[in-house]
Image: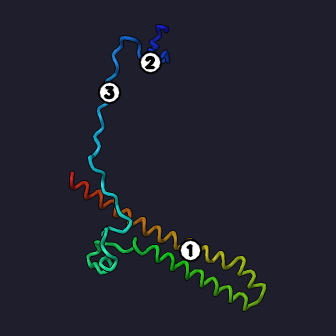
Amino acid sequence: MSDQGDGPSGGPGAQPYGSPTPPAPPPRRYPTTPPPVPSATGLGGGVGLLTALFDLTFHRFVTTRVVTFIYALVMAAAALYALALLAVGFRIGVGVGLLFLLVVCPLFFLLVVAVYRVLLELAVVIFRIHESLDVLVRRGDQL
């Protein structure tokens, strides 16, 4: 051992023998129960879809519950419209039909689905922000 302050481990910066150890940091205080997690089904929790749909006070939201159904409808409608475009392209001519088959219809489908996906995700994010803020407000009222 050297007299440069190396401790029992011998590493640089270790406490020399006989020096006081630094005080331990105070223990962290964690809540005894975890905070409630916002549900993906809206503020109503277990409330039925029809009950939330006819809630005239708008305390329960249906958007987060039906967004999957809306997205499936958008995808089906975009696919049907792309097929209709394809039929129009082949009625014009085989060359135009092949162009629509390989370029126009896939791009149309992907563009429509991507735009609606972003819009629906934006709506869900807004509602989840509201749910999270509602939980924080309720937790702040309990403190």
Left or right: residue 134 compared with residue 77: left
In the rendered image, which residue does mark 3 sit on? 24
**Element type at mark 1:** helix
What amino acid is found at the position of numbered circle 3 in the picture?
Ala
- Residue 63 located left or right of residue 83: left
Q: Compared with residue 65, is residue 129 higher up or lower down, i.e. above or below? A: above
Q: Which residue is mark 2?
A: 14
What is the crowding at mark 2: few (fewer than 14 residues within 10 Å), some, or many (at least 20)?
Answer: few
Residue drawn at 29 percent across, 78 percent down: 51
In the rendering, at what x and y percent does residue 13 appear? 46, 18
Indicate the quadrant where residue 125 lies. Answer: bottom left
- Looking at the image, the residue that sits furthest to the left is 142
Q: Amino acid at mark 2?
A: Ala
Query: Badge 1 is on which residue?
Result: 113
Is the residue marked by circle 1 packed among few (<14), some (14-19), or many (20+) residues within 10 Å? many
Q: Secondary structure at mark 2?
A: loop
| 141, above or below 118, in the image | above
Q: Is residue 41 above or below residue 78?
A: above
Mark 3 nearby-residue class (10 Å; few <14, some 14–19, many ≥20): few
Q: CA distance from mark 1 to mark 2?
A: 61 Å
Q: Position of residue 19 (x, y in %)?
A: 36, 13
**Left or right of 26 in this view: 129:** right
First-in-chain label (3 vs 1): 3
Mark in the foreground, 3 or 1: 3
- Amino acid at pointer 1: Val
Extreme right residue here?
95
Residue at image position (34%, 63%) is 131
Identify the mark nearer the N-term, 2 or 3. 2
